[in-house]
Amino acid sequence: MSAGLQGLWDDAVAESRRLAVQMRALAAFWIDPASPDTDPCEVDEMDLRVALALRVTEHVAHRRIRQAHIAVVDLPGVWRRLAAGELPAPWMTRILAKTTDLTPVQRALVDAEIASWDLAVTAEQFARQLGLVITRIHSRQLLAEDQQPAARRCVEVRRIEEEGVACLSVLGPVPEIHALATRLDAAARAVQAAQRRTLTAIATRPGDGGDAGTGVSAGAGDGVVPFDDGTVGRAGRAMSLAALRYAILTRSILDTGSVEVPAPRFRVGVTVPATTLLGAGDEPGLLDGTIPIPADMARSLAGGEDTWYRVLTDPITGAFLPARQERYQPTRGMLEHLRHRHGTCAVPGCARPTSQAAECDHIIEYDHTDPGRGGLTAIENLHLLCWQHHLAKTLGRLDPTRLPVPDQGRGHGPGSTRWVFTDTTSVDVPDDTDLFTPRIATDLADHWAAHQRLQRQRRRGLDRERQRDLPDDPGPPPC
């Protein structure tokens, strides 16, 4: 690691330690307002003193005191890892945001889970694992009818403090909102591709003399640019995806006219642990490989499908087991395996989901002139990248290396990829794993052992009953 990057790393470690020290100091000022012995005036006075010391509002001071109390008292294992510099400060902020509304008992479960984690993961992997843990806890709660996801469907217009700007908010069950967002994104990408094709056709039309750099005519015959808001013809380039999503949403209700939206490359999948399907556990499902959903919702979605697909994971490590490779082109099963291995672009720090416009890439480049010398089309030599990072890798700005899969002795361990960004800077990114597989495997083993004990007890009971039903021994016959 270069000196400059090492300095940034050291600053981040020092930031974590400073935050831990500050939290310990703030936690000492906590007074529980819910306690019957608490004087509300005393709470207000304490909050005001801290607000003056931190130069923040009284409301902000109360929130920071409460979060510090939660961190030090309810999340001691996590706080210790923060104090050691192992847990980045932004990750601690995310944990507190997710656990503020939990009970102390529920926070203890979260603390025990996170304190045992290997934190040598990316920010995206950490956020996904944290989301799964929080969703698993919520799955065990009984929600009131008006708090069920289906009962909270609504569309609201919110005013923004910035003049002339408003926000349209759509709230509803995760699968429905995710499906809407996926359709909107697919429509925007299809229209953007159509705009680019039209611009290319106009610029290369014989006798047109058009120049994409000086503007084009986009209003006649087959040269009409779809969904042009007036900027495409002038600038000579397609609209951004953000602008197209807005245009399609506000002008057509997801109707793209003559533009055909390609079929999705992947299924929008819901991964559900077997024990959750059987009702023997409350481990959450994963929608599209990245979004945790409660156990009840996962069971409901799975129950509405006629076909299920099996995803194998190692019972010890939770690593996704590779599918067999039987032909040169990656199969659909291989592509979906790669989605499980990395729910987002494989480049560390990129949060773009692999379900949207991801491109399959050979880690060791395939040699088109001599296929025997190039990288194999095999699971361990493939990953999914967003198109921007795929281009960066093709241009040589990123250099990944697939590291050997570790021998766990008892199971197949997760692999990792080493990314080299400069001659001196590299980072190893571990594959995603199924966080709950080891726990599920242990639970199943415990259930099986209990079943066997029960069977032995029943057999012993039957043997005793048979013994009681046998006639008394009359002794030897008379001579």
Image (cartoon, rainbow, N blue to C red):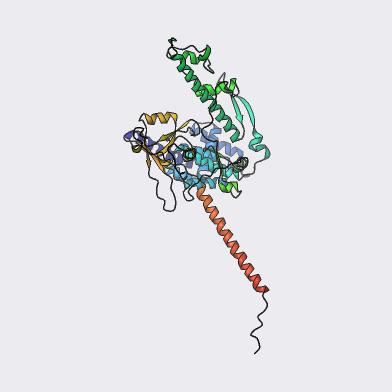
Which of the image's four quarters has the N terminus?
Answer: top left
Q: Is residue 29 visible?
A: no
Q: Is residue 235 left or right of residue 146?
A: left
Q: Where residue 339 sits in the image (x, y, percent)?
A: 48, 38
Q: Where residue 244 sits in the image (x, y, percent)?
A: 53, 22
Number of numbered discs on residues: 0
> Image height check: is 280 above or below 204?
below
Which residue extends farthest bottom? 479
The front one of 294 and 48 is: 294
Find residue 176 and report its image quarter: top right
Query: What residue is drawn where x is 65% and y is 86%?
Result: 477
Q: Where residue 313 sits in the image (x, y, percent)?
A: 49, 47
The front one of 146 and 35 is: 146
Q: Where residue 110 sits in the image (x, y, percent)?
A: 53, 45
Find residue 397 and report its image quarter: top left
Which of the image's four quarters has the C terminus?
Answer: bottom right
> Image height check: is 405 above or below 263?
below
Query: What residue is drawn where x is 66% and y is 70%?
Result: 465
Query: What residue is drawn where x is 44% and y is 53%?
Result: 410
The front one of 405 and 377 is: 377
Q: Is residue 411 visible?
A: yes
